[in-house]
Image (cartoon, grey):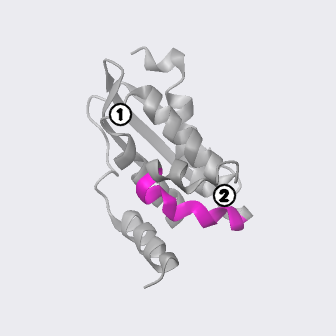
Amino acid sequence: MDLNSIYTEIITEHNASKHNKHELEGANIVENGHNPSCGDEITLQLKIKDNIIEDASFTGIGCAISQASTSIMIDLIKGKTVEEAKELAHTFIGMIKREITDDKELEVLEDALAFKNVSNMPARVKCAVLAWHTLDEATTSSNSDK
């Protein structure tokens, strides 16, 4: 099985899985993300306490890429500090924009590496980065003081 097949399988599994797709009781940050070019919409819900993302979830509609990217991102950020989560978001976006190409630097993205080749599909880039931009917006200093 080649790497592209493995990555496709990861995206398919996360799109089908609902383990991160639900309302989050007790969320203290809720941020909406929308991709007007294709209609993808997510609502990211975070439970942050003492600068740690204790839990996260999302609801929304969209293509397999946007939904899987959101689910994978949530798996990565749970238990991280807000700063660590923002750094992961910047690394992911940098990977998609081809600004970060060092495999060693990208290892922190774990399953999110499945989206590395999305940069070759310009129409899908906004789908892949929707959740990560929404996370970045949700964790700005004015929001994460909660």
Viewed as shown, does residue 139 lie left or right of 76? right
Does the magenta-highlighted stretch encompass residue 27?
no
- Residue 3, above or below 116: below
Amino acid type for the residue under numbered disc 1: Lys
Instruction: Point out the frontmost of discs 2 and 1.
Output: 1
User: Measured from the top left, where is residue 145 in percent x and y?
Assistant: 43, 14
The numbered mark at residue 125 is: 2
Q: Quadrant of the C terminus?
A: top left
Residue 63 is at least partly visible in this image: no
Q: Residues within 10 Å of mark 2 (few under 14, many from 20)?
A: some
The image shows residue 101 at horizontal and vertical percentages of 64, 54
Q: Which residue is at a point 41% across and 75% down the rendered structure image?
A: 9
Magenta segment, prevailing SS (helix, strand or loop): helix
The residue pinned by badge 1 equals: 80
Magenta-colored stretch includes residue 119 = yes
Q: Is residue 126 above or below residue 84?
A: below
